[in-house]
Amino acid sequence: MKVLVTGGAGYIGTELVTLLVNNPLVDQVIIYDNLSRPNFNLFLGLRLNNAHKIKFVKGELLDSRALKKILPGVDVVYHLAAKVTTPFANADAHAYEQVNHWGTAELVYAVEESDVKRFIYTSSTGVYGSSKMPAHEDKPPDPQTFYAASKLRGEEHVRRLIGKKDTYIMRCGNVYGYSKSMRFDAVINKFVFEANFNKRVTIQGDGNQSRTFIHIEMVARALNNLLTADLPSDVYNIVDKNLKVIDILDVLKGLIPDLEFIFINQHLRLHELNVKVNPLITDTLQIRNSRTLEEDLIDFLKKFSF
């Protein structure tokens, strides 16, 4: 089986590629990435097992000619590439539209003309907007940032493939946890970094806003298992837990007793988003989590060099 991973050098992509190259069903993994973050960590360190299966292509999503050139023979496409900049999800609307919306459109156009059998798109639970009651897949989207709006527009293009190919739109919660291709702008990752090195964490708002989260290992495992999973083409949430920001800090405080909190604009109550865990996804893709947040953070803290 030949697999293409757009954004394969990114945070999720690095972990997914590691699993795919060790998957006996996979003969080749093509990583298509423009290295815009820039992120070269996938290419460094100890040589991966089965590294001969990997091919790297530096390219842009908006380069339709390059996309069509690499698709012949590809059986499965994972579309992870995206413009993601937390907390500036409402800045530079043009960049979000170009990459997340029109870049996805170009990829879908190319896939429509190919022999690709399965298409997997990682979207975001941010498309739901705010929701105190746990949102589920049938909740009408209400994106409230440029980033979320661009991901939803990308979804609309991907939906055209449903009925033609096995097509999955996977809305991920806030991803956290260690990867060699780290993102330290994500909520929990940022807190853990600040707590470990500064012993001081900065919080926007009063800390009572809740978000939905999932560990990077669970996301990678879910996507790897989706390679062959018997699942109807549809939209699915990949989430694990809903947490208030202050609850995350309480766990960190227990691990680092001298940790200090600094609240900025504490009078503001920021939007909340809770998302319902889908048991069909946790069971079918084998991502039921047996670890607590405290155990995840202990493991994360151990990854730092000092």
Image (cartoon, helix red, strand yellow):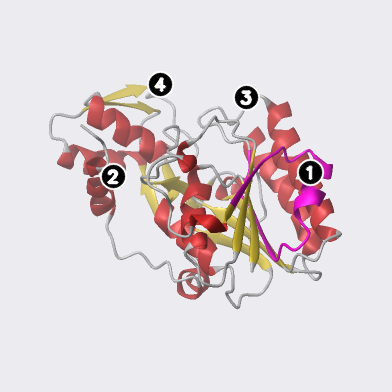
- Residue tagged 2: 300
Assign a secondary structure to mark 2.
helix
Which amino acid type is marked by label 3?
A: Ala
Quadrant holding the C terminus: top left
Residue behind mark 3: 91
Closer to the observer: label 4 or label 2? 2
Q: Residue furthest bottom?
A: 230
Judge the density around disc 4: few (<14), some (14-19), many (≥20) Cα neighbours within 10 Å.
few
First in sequence, mark 3 or 2: give its number. 3
Q: Label 1 sits on what residue type?
A: Ala
Which mark is first along the chain, 2 or 4? 4
The range drawn in magenta is 55-82
Of the two numbered discs 4 and 1 in the rendering, the one whose residue sits closer to the viewer: 1
Q: CA distance from mark 3 to mark 1?
A: 29 Å
Q: What label sits on residue 265 in the rendered view?
A: 4
Q: Is residue 110 left or right of residue 183?
A: right
Residue 148's spot in the image, x, y percent? 63, 41
Residue linked to disc 1: 66
Q: Does any portion of residue 53 appear in the rendered image?
A: yes
Crowd rating for badge 3 (residues with CA inside 10 Å; few <14, some 14–19, many 20+): some
Tell me which amino acid carries mark 2.
Phe
**Residue 206 in the figure: left or right of residue 104:** left
Q: In the displayed structure, does residue 261 sit left or right of residue 264?
A: left
Q: Dots 4 and 1: beta carbons under 8 Å?
A: no
Residue type, label 4: Asn
Q: Position of residue 302 (x, y in %)?
A: 22, 43
Q: CA distance from mark 3 to mark 4?
A: 20 Å
Judged from the image, the secondary structure of the residue bearing numbered disc 4 is loop
Q: Earlier in the sequence, mark 1 or mark 2?
A: 1
- Residue at figure coordinates x 80%, y 71% from the top left: 163
